[in-house]
Image (cartoon, helix red, strand yellow):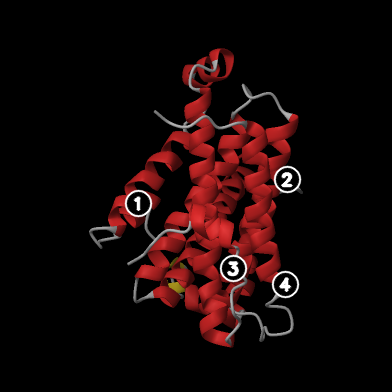
Amino acid sequence: MLPTITKEFLEKEAIKVAEFAEVNLKKTEGHLEKHNDILDYYFGVIRRQSILLNELALILIHSKTQNITPLFIICRCLCDDFINMFYLKLNDNEEENIIRINANASYEDFKSLNILTQSNEKHFKGEYPYYMSAKQLADFKKGYIADKNHQQYFVNIENFEFKKYMQLRQVAEKIEDFELSKLSPRAYYLWSYFSSFIHYSAKTLISEMYNANEQLHLFMIEETILYSFNTTELAFRYFTEKYGIKLTEDEQLFKRYMIKYE
């Protein structure tokens, strides 16, 4: 039987782990070179843990327990971060995979822009002022390619073909170490469960109206806080290895949430 967990307890834990991220992020100030994809990724993901955990704490304490959708949307983001971070730190192609993550994000942006541009040309003869015309999109692509920082995102720059990154399920399945691979399916299961509240269905209504699984849901939220703590710890390893900045540890948090990798 799972131990009883309260919203008040989770609020405090979320704030503690957010503060753990904030304290360590401040230690990177003054040590950072010119921005690059790798540095920005690790800096940004730690910053994101702090922001999302503080938001999680606010919702926990100020919203009814039944209103779990906003909590689960945040938890989905945190699980996503952990699975990717877990994979990056266990894979030899860490830097290339971060480049692929960023390339994939740009690919999705341009795919969406292309849909709007096609609509503009089809429905408004390219004259709708809030969408790009075909010529404007072509010029925008040229400007994007001209930025040297973006050129690493392409597998074929002449055809505007981006490098691709894996789907999250593939990322979870790529973690091959026997012991550690016990964690990735669980984190992916939570991610998938939380995702089901983004796309509305009867499950959402039933879960929020009747709240039969309140304790289970609170337990899942704390498990997500555990993943977020480890995302920060794993991401900060970059700053330790690159700049010799030592992680400020919290004994209580390490005892409760730290994943043992050996």
Amino acid, disc 4? Lys
Sequence-earlier tag: 1 or 3: 1
Amino acid, disc 3? Glu
View extreme (top): residue: 210
Distance from the alpha carbon under mark 1 to that under mark 3: 23 Å
Q: Position of residue 250 (x, y in %)?
A: 60, 63
Sequence-earlier tag: 2 or 4: 4
Q: Position of residue 154 (x, y in %)?
A: 45, 73
Q: Residue at x 56, y 56 (%)?
A: 253
Foreground tag (1 vs 3): 3
Residue denoted by label 3:
249
Residue denoted by label 2:
128
Distance from the alpha carbon under mark 2 to that under mark 4: 45 Å
Considering only vertical position in the picture, is 256 above or below 261? above
| Mark 3 crowdedness (10 Å alpha carbons): few <14, some 14-19, many ≥20 | few
| Mark 1 crowdedness (10 Å alpha carbons): few <14, some 14-19, many ≥20 | some
Which quadrant of the rendered structure holds the C terminus?
bottom left
| Mark 4 crowdedness (10 Å alpha carbons): few <14, some 14-19, many ≥20 | few
State whether residue 136 appears in this view: no
